[in-house]
Structures are given as structure tokens and as C-alpha cells.
Image: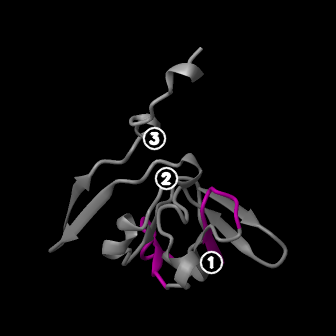
């Protein structure tokens, strides 16, 4: 997590971006956001939650009142739903995230996170281009 305090706005940078959840950038969809390890802490300010891709559309939430972030905090983005993963991509060579199903108060992993090797797994280098 990175925190940037600009003159007019404060940002929380996370390791998920519009390649992970594109709906806020495409449709201006609203997703509740919370500091998962600080549910009962006082809120310290208003932040934009942004991703690592460094493009203007790489955000998950605007103007959210949150506790002041610290290294090691966990940001939860709620209601990503069925469209979250199906609309995700490997844009900018970012592997897709894991999927976790939460039901009746229990969480279980239903798809492992991709690794960098998964980005290249099905690539074929034509014979004439090999060194």
C-alpha cells in the first residue's frame, strides 16, 4: 500500500487496479470500500483508492472516508460480484487475482491467483524468431 498526499487530494495505492475490477472506470460503478483490519477505527480523511497501472482510469473508488492508512493495512472492495473476474484482464502484464467465495460467513478459495509464468504459458515463438 502506498499513500500519496497531494495538495487537493489524498490517495491510497493498492495492488489491484482497473485490470482487476474495471467496472468503476467503465461504468462509474460504486463499490463500498473499507480498511479490513480497521473496521472499528475512527476515520481520518477522504481518499481515492487507486491501482498500480498509473493511468487516469486506474481507480477503484473516489472520495471515500477511511481510517488513516498505514503499511500493512488491508483494503477490502465489496460487491465485486460475478462480473469482477469475468471482466478482469491481464492488461499491462498484470496477472489476474485469486477468486474467493464468501458464503454464510465462510470464505474459500475457488481460483488461485495467476503468476507471471501464466502470462506466457500459451505463447509460441515461431521458429524463425528464435535465437
Judging by the rendered image, the residue that carries numbered circle 2 is 90
Inspect the magenta stretch and tell me whether residue 89 lies in it.
no
| Along the viewing direction, whichever of 44 and 48 lies nearer the viewer | 48
| Along the viewing direction, whichever of 27 and 13 lies nearer the viewer | 27
Counting from the top left corner in percent of width and height, residue 27 is at: 53, 84
Inspect the magenta stretch and tell me whether residue 39 lies in it.
yes
Query: Residue at (42%, 68%) from the top-left corner?
Result: 87
Residue positioned most to the front: 128
Number of the label disc, if any, that sits on residue 119 = 3
| Along the viewing direction, whichever of 24 and 129 lies nearer the viewer | 129
Image quarter hosting the N terminus: bottom right
Counting from the top left corner in percent of width and height, residue 116 is at: 47, 38
Q: How far apart are the two marked residues, 1 and 3, measured between alpha carbons? A: 39 Å
Tell me if label 1 and label 2 are in contact, CB under 8 Å.
Answer: no
Judging by the rendered image, the residue that carries numbered circle 1 is 44
Image quarter hosting the C terminus: top right
Which numbered disc flags the more N-terminal residue, 3 or 2?
Answer: 2
Number of the label disc, if any, that sits on residue 70 = none
Q: Could you tell me if residue 20 is visible in this image?
A: yes
Tell me if label 3 and label 2 are in contact, CB under 8 Å.
Answer: yes
Q: Is residue 72 left or right of residue 78?
A: right
Highlighted magenta segment, given as a residue range: 30-55
Q: How far apart are the two marked residues, 1 and 2, measured between alpha carbons? A: 34 Å
Describe the element under mark 2 as helix, strand or loop: loop
Query: Residue at (47%, 58%) from the top-left corner?
Result: 89
| Along the viewing direction, whichever of 13 and 86 lies nearer the viewer | 86
Amino acid at each position: 500500500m502506498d499513500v500519496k498526499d497531494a495538495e487537493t487530494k489524498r490517495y491510497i495505492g493498492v495492488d489491484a487496479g482497473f485490470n482487476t475490477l474495471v467496472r468503476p472506470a467503465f461504468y462509474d460503478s460504486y463499490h463500498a470500500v473499507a480498511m479490513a483490519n480497521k473496521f472499528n477505527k475512527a476515520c481520518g480523511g477522504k481518499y481515492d483508492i487507486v491501482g498500480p497501472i498509473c493511468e487516469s482510469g486506474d481507480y477503484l473508488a473516489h472520495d471515500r472516508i477511511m481510517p488513516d492508512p498505514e503499511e500493512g493495512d488491508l483494503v477490502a472492495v465489496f460487491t465485486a460480484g460475478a462480473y469482477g473476474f469475468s471482466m478482469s484482464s491481464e492488461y499491462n502484464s498484470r496477472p489476474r487475482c485469486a477468486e474467493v467465495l464468501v458464503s454464510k460467513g465462510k470464505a474459500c478459495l475457488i481460483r488461485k491467483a495467476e503468476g507471471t509464468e501464466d502470462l506466457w504459458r500459451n505463447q509460441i515463438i515461431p521458429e524463425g524468431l528464435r535465437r
